[in-house]
């Protein structure tokens, strides 16, 4: 999720070379053979945005999850048997990369941790973060940065004279 920054605007997957470098360091399976693969990966990231927003209580979760179906249809996964069976990506190329991501999501949902993955509510940030608050009510990636920006903005709005 955090391959695009909004403040200042930076796209880590801006070109095929940069995307390949990111993927090589990500620990995900697969490879990017073309710019079409890179765009597919960006499309998956964008399809995940409403899912992360629904974790924070915004939007329709069913509709958000439905946006992932085209990616799931083309991402082969298989069950690795064992005492604790796990989903593993199958296939090659960008399909294996997407399968790795979807398999990780599956694991997080079943571990009960998925709901704590959210997008920062600060419009200039939108950074994905793991909500470590005791009751799962976190809304900003960092209280020190985005939380303070939000509080300062609200304080300025309250102190403006009304005409």
Image (spheres, rainbow, N blue to C red):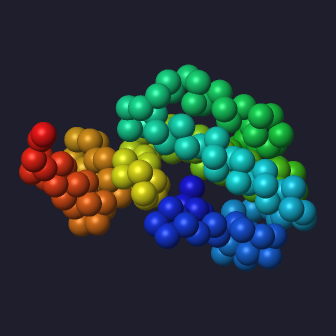
The residue under the point 90% across, 63% down is: 34
Q: Nearer the viewer, residue 116 or 63?
A: 63
Q: Nearer the viewer, residue 73 or 140?
A: 140
In x, y percent, where is residue 82?
65, 46
Does residue 158 appear left or right of residue 136 in this picture?
Answer: left
Does residue 65 appear left or right of residue 71 in this picture?
Answer: left
Above or below, 112 against 145 in this view is above
In x, y percent, where is residue 112?
42, 39
Does residue 140 appear left or right of residue 119 in this picture?
Answer: left
Does residue 52 appear left or right of residue 12 in this picture?
Answer: left
Quadrant of the rendering where the N terminus is positioned: bottom right
In x, y percent, where is residue 55?
43, 37
Q: Nearer the viewer, residue 122 or 141?
A: 122
The residue under the point 41% across, 51% down is: 123
Quadrant of the rendering where the C terminus is positioned: top left
- Any part of residue 141 in sight: yes
Tell how many labels: 0
Q: Quadrant of residue 78?
A: top right
In x, y percent, where is residue 103?
65, 46
Q: Quadrant of residue 15?
A: bottom right
Q: Residue furthest front?
A: 163
Above or below, 72 against 142 in this view is above
- Any part of residue 82 in sight: no
Q: Nearer the viewer, residue 26 or 60?
A: 60
């Amino acid at each position: 999720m955090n391959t695009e920054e909004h403040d200042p605007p930076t796209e880590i997957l801006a070109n095929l070379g940069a995307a390949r470098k990111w993927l090589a360091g990500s620990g995900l399976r697969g490879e990017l053979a073309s710019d079409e693969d890179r765009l597919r990966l960006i499309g998956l990231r964008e399809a995940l945005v409403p899912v992360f927003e629904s974790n924070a209580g915004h939007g329709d979760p069913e509709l958000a999850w439905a946006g992932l179906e085209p990616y799931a249809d083309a991402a082969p996964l298989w069950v690795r048997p064992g005492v604790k069976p796990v989903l593993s990506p199958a296939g090659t190329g960008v399909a294996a990369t997407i399968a790795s991501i979807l398999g990780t999501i599956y694991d997080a949902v079943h571990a009960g941790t998925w709901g704590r993955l959210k997008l920062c509510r600060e419009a200039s940030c939108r950074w994905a973060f793991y909500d470590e608050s005791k009751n799962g009510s976190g809304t900003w990636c960092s209280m020190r940065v985005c939380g303070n920006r939000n509080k300062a903005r609200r304080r300025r709005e309250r102190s403006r004279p009304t005409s």
